[in-house]
Image: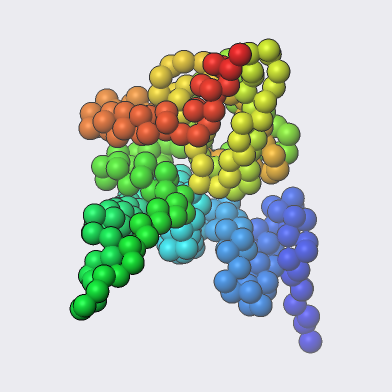
């Protein structure tokens, strides 16, 4: 009797070091039998399929993952996965369109929720009143909780179809170890970043030249956009707090897309105006006005 080799997920790195992609895929397949919805394993599977040259199967797995991450509100991860699809096969524009539709649907739901709250706020207090008396004043409806990754939805859903495909196909997914300086205050910036996983610390300089922690940003947050969209130097230093994965979008990419799709300029202008009023920028302004 011939015994088949037993492939273990614990030995995955060893298979990859030897470029034994068949062994690596067999190890992942064994692990997926026990955890079929382990999306980290599925990500590794798709990555290795691409390395092994099986692009069709890799794209199939990636598309499943992109749908899943969008469905659970992890839009930054869905965008990173769609970037991988377009890098493997630039002709997969329908993957970008599917993501755009999901983002647009989420943006529409958020706008409807805001409209409902505004309508409630305009109703007379205590309306309607019971017969023969008046009801106590009704409290104003609470402000809506921030939607998961709302800036991501707002930014990417505003891109026209072809422009979004071009953008997602041109971005880079990068990883940084804990303590790495991703952008440095005072330097010229030619990229903006979207956090896919992990967190970063934002530091500024007060009028006395002392470093001050301004914020901690996490999955779904942007940073570096002010320098890219205005041409001014970086306004703060951003440091990886733990292992961080980001999507990097270069100024050159945005400029090229604007040349082909002039309507994108309006999307970027609106994004900048709204981000200029974000917490970090306000804190920086107050910090520099401090005595």
Image position of 90 with respect to 230: above or below: below
Quick one: which residue is furthest to the bottom in this view? Answer: 1
Work out whether 116 lies above or below 211.
below
Q: For residue 137, say whether it is visible.
A: yes
Applied colour scheme: rainbow
> In the image, is 13 to the left or to the right of 146?
right
For the C terminus, which image quadrant? Answer: top right
Q: Residue at x 38, y 38 (%)?
A: 167
Q: Nearer the viewer, residue 236 or 55?
A: 236
Q: Nearer the viewer, residue 189 or 42?
A: 189
Residue 141 lies in what quarter of the image? bottom left
**Based on the displayed image, in which of its 4 quarters is residue 239 positioned?**
top right
Q: Does residue 96 lie above or below 12 as drawn?
A: above
Q: Where residue 172 appears, x then y in whole percent? A: 51, 37
Q: Do we see residue 250 in this rendering?
A: no
Q: Nearer the viewer, residue 92 or 127?
A: 127
Residue at 66%, 67% (x, y): give it.
28
């Amino acid at each position: 009797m011939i015994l088949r080799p037993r492939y273990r997920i614990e030995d995955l790195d060893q298979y990859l070091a030897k470029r034994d992609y068949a062994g690596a895929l067999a190890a992942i397949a064994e692990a997926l039998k026990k955890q079929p919805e382990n999306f980290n394993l599925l990500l590794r599977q798709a990555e290795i399929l691409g390395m092994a040259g099986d692009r069709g199967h890799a794209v199939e797995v990636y598309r499943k993952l992109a749908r899943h991450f969008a469905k659970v509100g992890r839009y930054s991860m869905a965008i990173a996965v769609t970037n991988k699809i377009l890098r493997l096969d630039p002709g997969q524009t329908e993957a970008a369109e599917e993501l755009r539709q999901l983002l647009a649907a989420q943006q529409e739901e958020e706008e409807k929720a805001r409209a409902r709250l505004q309508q409630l706020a305009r109703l007379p207090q205590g309306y309607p009143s019971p017969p023969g008396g008046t009801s106590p004043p009704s409290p104003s409806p609470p402000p809506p909780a921030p939607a998961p990754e709302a800036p991501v939805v707002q930014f990417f859903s505003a891109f026209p179809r072809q422009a979004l495909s071009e953008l997602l196909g041109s971005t880079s997914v990068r990883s940084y170890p804990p303590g790495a300086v991703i952008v440095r205050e005072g330097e010229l910036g030619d990229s903006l970043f979207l956090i896919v996983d992990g967190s970063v610390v934002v530091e500024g300089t007060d009028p006395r030249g002392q470093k001050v922690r301004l914020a901690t940003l996490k999955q779904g947050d942007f940073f570096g956009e002010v320098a890219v969209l205005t041409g001014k130097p970086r306004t703060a230093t951003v440091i990886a707090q733990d292992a961080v994965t980001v999507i990097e979008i270069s100024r050159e990419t945005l400029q090229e897309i604007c040349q082909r799709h002039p309507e994108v300029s309006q999307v970027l202008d609106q994004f900048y105006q709204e981000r200029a009023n974000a917490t970090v920028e306000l804190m920086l302004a107050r910090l520099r006005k401090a005595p």
